[in-house]
Image (cartoon, rainbow, N blue to C red):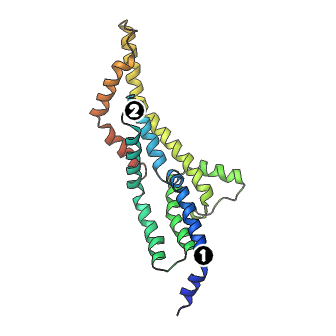
């Protein structure tokens, strides 16, 4: 009757190894949050919005980072719930060991990353390591999934950033052409373009559109 419990106990990590593993995870936690969640795409797109508006440091960097973190928490909540169900709860109940909980918890996160990863980016790292192509997404190791995911996120973020910057670029060009046609070449175009871009952004409810586009891009 006690054989499963004894087997789990025998395969558990030693307390010193547990402490070392926890300290390592805590040290790498910022990098893990940056590279395995939707934070990269979110913060890059929001930075493009601020650059397109051209209002300097408005909104401040702290606000951009805070909004990116909250949007990331909202986007990643289903994945966190899956990790809790498949790894944390069984581990707390004593049904699985430390390493089994780590493997079970990494699986929902890896599936999330692979859904957002382009095949070309993943194949790049497989070609670099000469590793055989996986049969299923679950066969992809995390060491290959993570860098491919980051590259795909940056590519998608820059694609969204181009779409965001185009309307602001049109306004800048129109204002510069108007000032030149009127002979007002000494007036900086940004002085006239900034209020127009802010008004345009407010009228179209820009923050709602940007946040909605980011959330829908992960659905």
Q: Which of 219 and 95 is in front in this view?
A: 95
Q: Say which quarter of the image contains residue 4.
A: bottom right
The spot of residue 99 in percent (x, y) is 57, 72
Say above or below: 216 vs 94: above
Q: Residue furthest top?
A: 183
Q: Disc 1 vs disc 2: which is toward the camera?
A: 1
Can residue 219 be seen by looking at this rendering? no
User: Could you tell me which secondary element the residue under label 2 belongs to?
Assistant: loop
Percent of width and height locating residue 5: 53, 86
Q: Which residue has dot 1 on it?
A: 14
Instruction: Look at 43% across and 52% down and name the residue there.
Output: 218
Of the image marks 1 and 2, the number of the one nearer the N terminus = 1
What residue is at 48 percent from the left and 75 percent from the top?
91
Label of residue 43 in the image = none
The residue located at (44%, 45%) in the rendering is: 42
**Image position of 154 (left or right of 69):** right
SS under mark 1? loop
Inter-mark Cα distance, 1 to 2: 50 Å
Label 2 neighbourhood size at 10 Å, few (<14), some (14-19), many (20+)?
A: few
Above or below: residue 146 compared with residue 189: below
Q: Which residue is denoted by mark 2 in the rendering?
A: 57
Decide which of 93, 22 is in the foreground and name it. Answer: 22
Q: Which residue occupies the foreground of this view, 142 or 29? A: 29
Q: Give how far across and how far down residue 97 sits, in percent.
A: 55, 76
**Where is residue 21 drawn, in percent x and y?**
58, 66
Residue drawn 37% across the image and 17% down it: 175
Where residue 129 sits, quadrant-wise, is bottom right
Outermost residue toward the bottom in this view: 1
Using a 10 Å C-alpha cutoff, classify the residue at mark 1 as few (fewer than 14 neighbours), some (14 to 19) or many (20 or more). few
Q: In this view, does 152 lie above or below 11?
A: above
| Residue farthest toward the right in the current orientation of the protein | 130
Front one among 79 and 181: 79
């Amino acid at each position: 009757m006690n054989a499963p419990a004894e087997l789990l106990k025998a395969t558990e990590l030693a307390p010193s190894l547990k402490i070392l593993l926890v300290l390592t995870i805590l040290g790498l936690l910022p990098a893990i949050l940056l590279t395995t969640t939707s934070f990269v795409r979110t913060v890059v797109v929001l930075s493009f919005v601020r650059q397109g508006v051209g209002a300097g440091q408005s909104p401040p960097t702290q606000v951009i980072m805070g909004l990116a973190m909250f949007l990331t928490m909202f986007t990643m909540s289903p994945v966190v719930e899956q990790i809790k169900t498949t790894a944390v709860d069984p581990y707390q109940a004593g049904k699985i060991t430390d390493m089994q909980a780590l493997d079970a918890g990494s699986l929902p996160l890896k599936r999330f990353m692979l859904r957002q990863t382009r095949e070309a980016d993943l194949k790049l790292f497989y070609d670099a390591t000469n590793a055989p192509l996986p049969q299923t997404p679950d066969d992809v190791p995390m060491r290959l999934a993570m860098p491919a995911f980051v590259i795909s996120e940056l590519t998608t973020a820059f694609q969204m950033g181009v779409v965001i910057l185009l309307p602001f670029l049109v306004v800048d060009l129109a204002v510069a052409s108007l000032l030149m046609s009127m002979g007002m070449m000494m007036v900086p175009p940004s002085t006239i373009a900034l209020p127009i871009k802010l008004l345009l952004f407010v009228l179209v409810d820009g923050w709602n559109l940007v946040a909605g586009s980011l959330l829908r891009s992960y659905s």
